[in-house]
Every structure is written in structure tokens, then in C-alpha cells.
Image (cartoon, grey):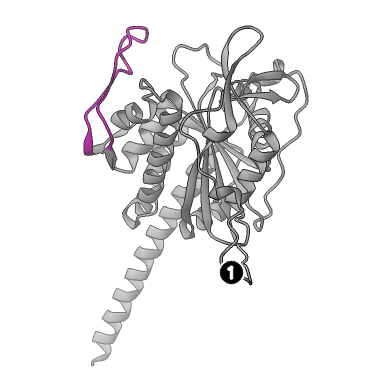
Amino acid sequence: MTRKTKRTIWISLAAFVLIVGGAAAFYFGSILNQLNGLQKEGDESPFAGIENVEKVSTPDPPKWEGTETVNILVMGVDARGLEKGEVPRSDSMMVVSLDPLTKKINLFSILRDTYVNIDGYGKERINTAITHGPNVAMKAAGDLLGIPVQYYVYTDFQGFIKLVDAVGGVDFDVEKDMHYTSKADNNEYDIDLKKGYQHLDGNTALMYVRFRHDAMSDYARSERQREFLKAVAAKMQSTTTIAKLPSILEEVNPYVDTNLTLSDMWKLGGLGYQSSMNGSEQIPPMKMLKEERTPGGAEVLSVTNEEKLKQYIQDIIHPPVQEEDSTTGAEDKTASGDEQDSKQPAQ
């Protein structure tokens, strides 16, 4: 090999390294820029006006140290028709629980009509908690589940649509025909889906997760939301989607608010990529809820036994060790997870 040829090879390699390095710098720089923009401050925050109406000083949520289970409250709202600065009730509330030791993810969807004590505001439906600020909402969810909720992610219908479209849509099995029309919102969010495996874009995905006009109403809807969120999470872990992460973040950035810092996002992003879905649950589960009316006559859902619910959550996040009976060789099946949910809520 001549000296000229060697020099050409080295020049080519150097150029390649520079190009790759420049692309990587642009890629990570774009991600950092967009992640920084997710945490809204000042007038950019959807909760900018909350301080004027809060009745109590709610303490900041506990910090995540990176070793214990981290719990994130994900809230979706319908912000249509509201005045600027007005915070809508949450249309959906989910807590994503990640265990850094087992690399398992559990998803809990909270029924929005669950009647709870909201610290400083008395008994209300849990979906009203966010109108008092994200710290109040995190505490309400944490008190119900019996776990510390360290973070929140808040978005509206448009943010959901943008996310699904940005990842290229999701192939999903729609379990039945879904049809609903409403003149109240000028038919902007009518629902018309056919049964079967199909590709859902942002608009059709929103139809799917919003539909509750059947016999099981919110019970079935919360299950659909969990299943679809798992499908989106799986799509986000694909190599193709990761390559598009800067553009995905750019699309959803204007519609998302969170208290996650840039450092938190990096740590949780790596943890989430390494983790797998363990399970998803409706909260309260059917066997632990009852339908009742408030003193004002409104229909709500309440928990039959709050301590049993908290233990139920713990048994899912940290399953009890099953001990083997030395006399029979049979495993101890006393864990609450072995109980079967009833088909109807307790009366």
C-alpha cells in the first residue's frame, strides 16, 4: 500500500468520524433542547394561575434517588372551550410505576369518578385534584394508592394526537365497532371505528381511548387506555422510533408539561428502555369499589377498604415471596393477587 493510499484512507476515516460525531452531537443536542422545553415555567405553565386559588401550601413531592421505585402520574385533559389559564379536570389519570431493580413497569389507571379526600379541599372526585395544581394531584393519587408519586406528566387531546402521529401511528386490534356523535362540540370529536386489526393515527387513536358509550362505560375505557398506552410504549422502544426522537419531542413539546428535570429524564429514559411491562390494573379494582351518591346526589365511586387497596398495590409492585409448604410441597397462595376480581362493583 502506497503512502498516498494510506493517507487517503486516513482522511476518509477522519471525515467519517467527523460526520458521525457531528450527527450525534446534533441528535443529542436536539434531544436536550426539546427535553429542556418540556418543563414549562412562568406564563408558559398551564398552572400559571393556580397559585391565586390554592387554599393550602402543598409540599413538593419526594425526590427520586434512582434506586427505589419511581411513580409518575400521567394526566390527559380535555382543554376545549376553556378560558386561558383555566385548568380542566383530568379526563384520564394513570400512574406509571418503574422498579429499577427488577426492571418491571406497572400501570395503574385511576377511575376519574373515584371519590377521595383531597388534602385541603375535602371530599371530591379525584379528577378535580389537578384543578388545584399538580402537587395536589400527585398527593391525591399517592394517598389513594399508598405510594409516593414523585413526578407528573400533563397533556391534552392535541398532545396525544401529536404523539401518536409522531411515532408513525400504531397497529392495534379494535375489539368492537365504536360509534358516538355529539353536536355539543360541533361533532369535532365524534367517534366512528370499525372492529378489527388496523392502523390508528392520532385522531383515530383518540377516538379509541375516549370511547365509553357502552355497558361498562369508564371501566372498559380505562382498560382500553392502558392497553393502548402499552402499545405506544412498545413502539417508542423500537430502533426506528428512537432515531426519530428529536422530531417526536419537537411535535409534542408545546402540549406537555412536567416536573421532570433533564437529569431525571435521562435516568428514567434509560431505565424505561431496559424495562418490560409487568402488568396493568384498574384502580380501584372491581372487587374493592362501590357505587354511591354524594350528599348533593352526584354518582361517584368509593373504595370499600382503603388499607386493603394499598396492600393490593404493594403486592403488585413488590410481589410477596411464595413459600413452599414443607409437608405438601404446595406453594402458599395467600397473596392478594390470587383473588379473582368480581365482574360487577360491590353495592
Is residue 188 on the magenta stretch? Answer: yes
Residue type at tag 1: Thr
Residue range corresponding to the magenta coloring: 174-197
Is residue 323 among the parts visible in the rendering?
yes
In-image side of 221 versus 196 (left or right)? right
Image quarter (top left, top right, bottom left or bottom right) of the N terminus: bottom left
Furthest residue in direction front, as rendered: 327
User: Is 294 in front, or is 69?
Assistant: 294
Q: What x and y, as percent, mark residue 245?
A: 39, 48
The answer to whether residue 204 is above or below residue 145 is above
Q: What x and y, as percent, mark residue 246?
A: 40, 47
Residue denoted by label 1: 328
Is residue 178 on the magenta stretch? Answer: yes
User: Is 166 in front, or is 225?
Assistant: 225
Q: Quadrant of residue 116?
A: top right
Q: Quadrant of residue 110?
A: top right
The answer to whether residue 280 is above or below residue 5 is above
Q: What residue lies at 28% left-to-right and 86% top-to-bottom?
A: 6
Q: What residue lies at 63% left-to-right and 71% top-to-bottom?
A: 327
Q: What x and y, as percent, mark residue 320?
A: 63, 57
Q: What residue lies at 60% left-to-right and 62% top-to-bottom?
A: 322
Decide whether the magenta segment is chiefly helix, strand or loop: loop
Image quarter (top left, top right, bottom left or bottom right) of the C terminus: top right
Few, some or many residues within 10 Å of mark 1 (<14, 14–19, 20+): few
The answer to whether residue 2 is above or below residue 182 is below
